[in-house]
Amino acid sequence: MRVFSSAAETVSLFEELEHTVDLLTRVQSFPELSAVLKLYVISWISLSDLLARLLNDTLDLGIAELDVKFDAIIRNEHVRRSGVPEIVKKYAKAIQYNHFRKLRNNIVHRGKLDDIELATIRIDWFRTAAKANVLRDVEWAANVALTETNVAERAQALIAKRQAEYREHLGVTFSFLNEIALVIVPIVTGRAL
């Protein structure tokens, strides 16, 4: 029962990630863009934690749920004999686990998204808005900043770029999960017989 619950949660979170990538097309502001990018990163790392829990349940490792972490479970002897580490190694560069883990830690513990391109556009917008704000209202200054620094075009280009990158990342993640499933499904079905 635990295996099916973990599998269902993993599939559900993957579907949420698909919707998160789709949300990028609806972004209208810097805070929205930052929030959606952060949501993707945090959710993707959560997906890796759910995968670790699924492996723990499938292989009946007996590791307490709070102690199950993806990078640690891959080193487990039973997991190493399952063929999963080879799949992880095959996809390591494409899924960028360490990169996303670092991003997630900076988001959760420091409240910041390490995205230099987004930060540069936001800083340019802020500088222009601050200069334009001389004796005028903030809304007027913000509009001036949008029109005078190509911020809107640059932001739209960045949104399209991030959506393509994250869609590709999610596609690779899908392939990765499928290969993991090819390893664990026979284990589950063999136990059920």
Image (cartoon, rainbow, N blue to C red):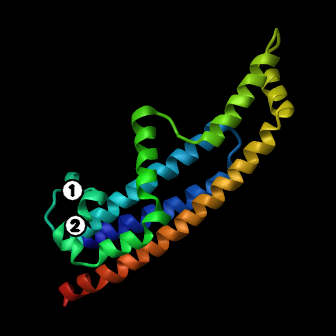
Q: Label 2: state its secondary structure.
A: helix
Name the quarter where the N terminus is drawn.
bottom left
Q: Residue at x 38, y 70 (%)?
A: 89
Q: Is residue 10 left or right of residue 147?
A: left
Q: Which of 177/82 is in front?
A: 82
| The disc label shown at residue 56, or none | 2
Query: In which image quadrant can residue 75 be found?
Result: bottom left
Inter-mark Cα distance, 2 to 1: 9 Å
| Residue 42 appears anywhere in the view | yes
Asked if disc 2 and disc 1 are in contact, CB closer than 8 Å, the reply is yes
Quarter containing the C terminus: bottom left
Secondary structure under tag 1 reads helix
For this view, does 25 lie left or right of residue 77? right
Identify the amino acid type marked 2.
Answer: Asn
Observer-nearest of 2 and 130: 130
Residue at left offset 44%, top offset 70%: 91
**Is disc 2 surrounded by few (<14), some (14 to 19) or many (20+) residues within 10 Å?**
many
Instruction: Identify the residue at horizontal 47%, vertical 64% (top origin).
Output: 93
Residue at left offset 36%, top offset 69%:
8
Viewer-proximal residue among 193 and 132:
132
Residue 124 position, x and y percent, is 73, 30
Q: Which residue is mark 1?
A: 65
Q: Is residue 80 above or below residue 99?
A: below
